[in-house]
Amino acid sequence: MFKKILIATVVCATSATTLHAQARPTATRPASLQVGVGWSNANTDYLPQRVNGTTLYVDYDFYHHLGVEGEFRYLKDGQSNIYEKTYEIGPRYSRTYHERYSPYVKALYGRGVFNFTYRGQTLANLAYNMMAVGGGLDYTLVRHINLRGEYEYQHWFGFPDHGLTPSMVTIGAAYRF
């Protein structure tokens, strides 16, 4: 009887270690990198109509729910040569629910370039410091592909009169490594 109890104890003790080792990689991940592209629609706070453009973004989540996002956006009015370009970087916080849904918030700082025109002639191409806050949802479509929907509000410092405060929505897709 003692021999059976000893064997059962040894089997249970060694199995628990093995099972723990199998479950550990699913609980931890050293980092996550995704690179994406999106289509943006914005209220520029300068023109009366909304404008469209392209967004490129890179997210690197380095610790649990914390990471950094870098973003480039180009918005151009189809009726004139007025455009906005932004280069931003900053922290991001995200959570994952049901293995597919990852809502996030972000706070970015960067540089915005505004191209002024009058009657088709370029008058100035000026750059301003800017900050942005936003949030959205990444949806895991398949293992390495995420779909994204987000809202972002920007404030450009030093822009004539009251500053520039564009707001935009973006939809896009990213490859996650």
Image (spheres, rainbow, N blue to C red):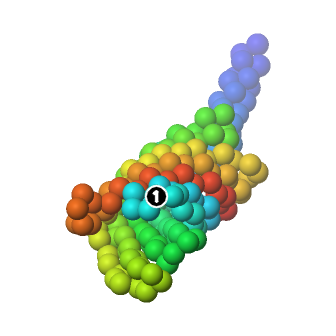
Q: For residue 115, which quarter of the picture? A: bottom left
Residue ranking furthest to the bottom = 121
The residue indicated by pointer 1 is 48
Height in image: 9 above or below 130? Answer: above
- Is residue 96 placed above or below 91 in the rendered structure? above
x, y (%) of residue 92? 43, 51
Q: Residue at x 43, y 86 (%)?
A: 121
Mark 1, secondary structure of its residue: loop
Which residue reaches farthest front? 119
Q: Nearer the viewer, residue 33 or 104?
A: 104
Front residue of 13 and 133? 133
Q: Quadrant of the N terminus?
A: top right
Query: Residue 170: percent from the left, percent from the top?
Result: 57, 55
User: Which residue is pictured at 58% across the width and 67% down the height?
Assistant: 54
Residue 153 image offset from top left, x and y in percent: 41, 51
Locate the C terminus by quadrant: bottom right
Task: Please state the horizontal and vertical placement of residue 97, each as a whole percent of the image.
Answer: 61, 35
User: In the picture, residue 174 is in which quadrant?
Assistant: bottom right
Query: Could you tell me if residue 79 is visible in this image?
Result: yes
Residue shown at 44% from the left, 70% from the top: 84
Amino acid carrying label 1: it is Pro
Instruction: Indicate left or right for 144 with 76 as reference.
Output: right
Q: Nearer the viewer, residue 60 or 27?
A: 60
